[in-house]
Image (tube, grey):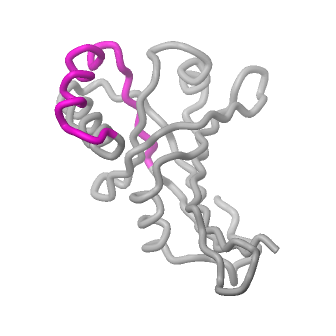
Amino acid sequence: MFRSMRRFKQAVSEEECRKILTEEKRGAFSVIGDDGYPYSLPINFYYDEEDNRIYFHGAREGHKVDALKKCDKVCFTTWNTGFQKEGRWEWNVTSVIVFGRAKIIEDKEIIVDRALKLALKYFPAREEIEEVFTRSIDKMQLFAIDIEHMTGKLVCEK
C-alpha cells in the first residue's frame, strides 16, 4: 500500500525515527484540503511511543478540522537540526515522514493526560502549565495521528 523508499541506502532505522519523533519539537502536518488541494501547517507535537501516536492540539474549528471530517488520511513530517562532518560545509539532516489517520480525541482523561505530556515538552516550568490548563483546557481540541507507515532518511545537503 505504501511505497518503499527509492533511495533505500539513506534509510534510517525505525528506532532512529522514533528517537527523532521523541526529541524534535516541530513538524509539518498535512491533510487533503479544500477542492483536493494539500493543506500543510506547522505544529508542535508529542509522540507517545507506547500508543504509537502523535498528539497535537488546535482549535475546535477551521480548515484542519473541516479537512479531517472529510478525510482522515494525513501525512506528518519532521526533521532534526542535523550535523556537519569536521571540515565540511554541508549539513547531514535526518527526516521522518509518517502516514496515518488522524482523529479528534473526545475522552477527557486522555485529553488531560496527553495535553500535559505535550506541554511538558515545551514549557519551562510545570507551574506555567497549570496556569494555562486552568484557562484553556476546555477550549482546546486534542488530535492524534495513528501511525500506519513511517520512514526516515539521512540526507547530505550537498
Query: 93 or 113, which lies in front?
Result: 93
Asked where in the image residue 34 lies, by quadrant, the reply is: top right
**Residue at the spot x=43%, y=65% of the render?**
18
Residue numbers of the magenta segment: 123-146
User: Is residue 10 toward the left or the right of residue 61 in the image?
Assistant: right
**Residue at the spot x=42%, y=46% of the render?**
54
Say whether residue 126 is magenta: yes
**Residue at the spot x=36%, y=42% of the render?**
122
Q: Quadrant of the C terminus?
A: bottom right
Where 158 falls versus 36 (above or below)? below
Where 96 falls versus 133 (above or below)? below
| Residue 50 spot, x, y in % from top left | 28, 57
User: Is residue 149 toward the left or the right of residue 41 in the image?
Assistant: left
Query: 123 or 109, which lies in front?
Result: 123
| Residue 145 spot, x, y in % from top left | 45, 42
| Residue 125 spot, x, y in % from top left | 22, 39
Say whether residue 21 is magenta: no
User: Is residue 5 toward the left or the right of residue 130 in the image?
Assistant: right
User: Is residue 158 toward the left or the right of residue 88 in the image?
Assistant: right
Where 90 falls versus 134 (above or below)? below
Q: Quadrant of the N terminus?
A: bottom right
Query: 106 or 24, which lies in front?
Result: 24
| Residue 93 spot, x, y in % from top left | 64, 68
